[in-house]
Structures are given as C-alpha cells and as structure tokens.
Amino acid sequence: MVVGRFVGAAGLSAVAVGGEVLTFLTFIAMGVSNAGQVIISQYLGAGRREKISKLIGTLFSFLLGCAVLLTAACLALEGQILNWVNAPPESLEYARDYVGVCVWGLVFIYGYNLVSAILRGMGDSKRPFLFIAIASAVNLVLDLAFIAGLGMGAFGAALATVLGQSLSFLCAIVLLYRTKEQFGFDFKPASFRIDKEAFAALIKLGVPMVLQSAAISFSKLFITSWVNTYGVIASAVTGIGNKLQTVTNVFAQALSTAGGSMIAQNIGAEKYERVPRIIGVSFALDSVVAVILSVVTLLFPRTVFGFFTQDEAVLDMAISYIPVAVLMYASCVLRPPMTALINGSGYARLNLAVALLDGLLVRIGLAYVMGRLMGLGIYGFWYGNALSSFVPFLIGGAYFLSGKWKTRRHIIQE
C-alpha cells in the first residue's frame, strides 16, 4: 500500500514480482517446518518427548543450511531470475532492488519458520503470534519512514521487511532458549547434529510438503511471467490481487496450521472422534472471514483497490478482477480444513498428489487453456489460478469421506 501510494504503478509491479520470487524461495522453509510441526505434535500426543529434542536439532541444521545455500545461489543469479519472470522494463530497477535486499533476509525467514514450528508443535501459538505482530508493526513504521519519509522506494520496502523478519526471528530464538527445559534441547553444539532417525521422519513427510509448496509457488511465478507480458498496469493489478489473496491466506494458513497440529495430536493419541469437530469449526471460521471480505469487495471495489494505488488505469482494470477475488475467498473456506487433515494425518503420498495437481498440472494447465487456447488472455490466467485453488478441497474431501485417516499413523513407528 505504501509503495503504491508513494512510488506508483512501477513500484507496485516491482513489489508484486519481487514478492512472488521471495515466496518461491521460501518453499523449503514452509514445507519442512510444517512437517516438523506435525511430527512434534504427533510425538507430543503419543507421549514420546525424548524424540522431540533430536528433531529440533535436525530442523535447525538442515533448514538454516538450506537458507545459506539459497542465498548464495540467488545472489549469483539475481539478474537472470528477473528475466525469467518477464519483469516489466518500467519496474525492473525497482524489482532488482527489492529482490536483492530480500534475499539477504532468507536466513531470518527460515529461522523464524522453524522456531515457530517448534513452538506451535508443542501447542504454543500465542507467542509466535506476538513476535510476528511486533515485527509487523516495526515493518510498517519503517515502510513509512524509508519510503514516504526518505524516498527509498522499493529498496526501502525490502529493507523494512528484512529488518522486521530479523526481529521476529531473534525474539523467537531468545524465547526458545529461555524455555529450553520444556523441549529438552540444550543448545549445545553437539545437539545440532542431524539425527538419522529424525531426519528420515522429516524427509518422509517434509519432501511432499516441500514439493507442494514449491509447485504452488513455481506455478504462480510461471503465471506471473505470462501476466507481466501484458505490461506494468496488468502486473500492478495482479500484484494487488495477490495481496488480497494474501489477506485471506493469512486466515487460511493460520487455521490450516492450527488444525493440522490439533489433528496430529489427536491422531497420535488415537482420539479420532475429535477430528471431524476440528474440521467443522475450521469451516465455520473460514466462512465468516470469506463472507465479510466478499461483501466488502463487491460493494466497495474502488475503495478496496484504492488502498493500494490512486492510478486510474490500474483502478479501471482492477474492477474486472473482482469475480476472481471472490473465487479466491471461496477457496479459502474450503481448502484449509482439508489441508489440515492431510498434513495432520501425515499422509505423505496424498500431499504429493495435491502438490502435483494443485501446484503444476491444474494451475498451469487451466491458466494455459483459458488464457492461451480459449483466447481469454490475462483474464484466463487469473481464473485458471483461482479455480486451481479448489483442488486440495476435492482431494481432501474424498480422503475424509473414505475414513482412512482414522487408522493411518505415518510418522510414529512403534
């Protein structure tokens, strides 16, 4: 919003492109940390605390090592990455600034995700929320200071983001250290050794989750590259649409993560009768959010999009995005409960199926068919991306009705 107001359409396009690149680069952090959270929850539910400390050390070493390697690779390929996604010429310099700074923050993104996964896996979601709330407030203040006050443009937006992420990670790591007795993790160098058994469990569930996260991020990046060929206005509108989707995904991800942990703990404790109740409550909460956002977007579209920019060309084109936004809101009602069930049960192969269908085949396939073959252009790309978001609901719904989740315990072995 700050970039759109003070830099304009080119800056908005740059942040949209850079944001998609950054999201793609976090696929390992999201997949592996979510897997670690589920495993910790299952161990906790089954009363096997002695395995948790080994998993924590393995998570730290593996994820932070991945972050360092990705940072080095991205710094070497920075210019090529922006060419691959067809960044519009008007926003190329801004996008280069944004991506260049954000890449340096990958270690903090990965670190915060892994520490938060540990805390949430143990049932503590309040303090990770507090840390990210503080960091977000700092991010907002720095955005205003760097962009509106000092005129630093997209570079200032990226710097504010990295500093906020750094703060959230440092707060989380300090808390984990101060409460280390609860986890049985002493932070000694030897404790960070990768344990073979813990790593095997992490890879078994984590690889499908990583592939799912990577496939979805890659497919969105792929579609963004098609959209960017339509110019900076189309890129800016898509960026606003992605931010509206991010708002809904905040709620969807939160309920999916919470539901996944609760389902994992109850499956670990063999209390299967609680799982449908968790899924039902998730549906109800998601519906409230989706209905409110849909009504506001339908009744006050120019106001909603006007938060991000006052560029009339962008606002005129953004009106045509409204049906797409409503579809996105609807998918955020149906997707999280089913994702929570699949993740919480630890069904690795089903996660892989969702990854391939949702992330690659359906998303890119629908966008190509509607955008290219049916001649709908940018509208086909938008609708193809939105409709593919319903895939996890369809697959997860069939899995729930089958009842097979009641007997599966994919992570814990006797």
Image (cartoon, grey):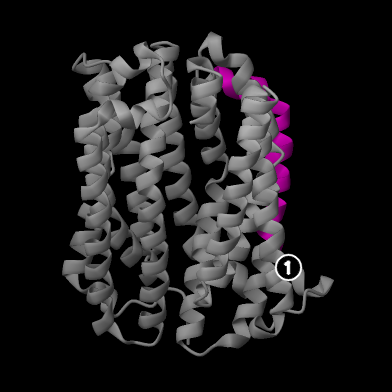
Find residue 113 and report its image quarter: bottom right
Residue at coordinates 35% horizontally, 54% vertically from top-left?
Answer: 252
Please identify the residue farthest to the left as the structure is shown: 401
Q: Position of residue 12 (x, y in %)?
A: 50, 23
The dominant secondary structure in magenta is helix
For this orientation, the residue located farthest to the right is 189
- Residue at image location 73% in from the left, 46% down from the top: 68
* 344 relative to 409, above or below: above
Q: What segment is highlighted magenta in the picture?
A: 61-83
Q: Is residue 70 magenta?
A: yes
Observer able to see residue 202: no
Tell me if residue 45 comes above or below residue 308 in the rendering: below
Q: Nearer the viewer, residue 245 or 338?
A: 245
**Amino acid at dot 1:** Val
x 31%, y 29%: residue: 303
Report the residue marked by disc 1: 174
Viewer-proximal residue among 222 and 402? 222
Give whichever of 76, 204 is nearer the camera.
Answer: 76
Q: Picture quarter containing residue 51?
A: bottom right
User: Quick check: 313 left or right of 80?
Assistant: left
In the image, taking residue 123 as reference, residue 71 lies left or right, namely right
What is the crowding at mark 1: few (fewer than 14 residues within 10 Å), some, or many (at least 20)? Answer: few
From what the image shows, is residue 381 above or below residue 120?
above
Q: Residue at x 38, y 48 (%)?
A: 249
Is residue 125 found inside the magenta-colored segment of the image?
no
Looking at the rendered structure, the number of numbered marks drawn on it comes to: 1
Secondary structure at badge 1 equals helix
Percent x, y for residue 364?
Answer: 33, 31
Q: Quadrant of residue 228?
A: top left
Residue 262 on image: x %, y %: 39, 75
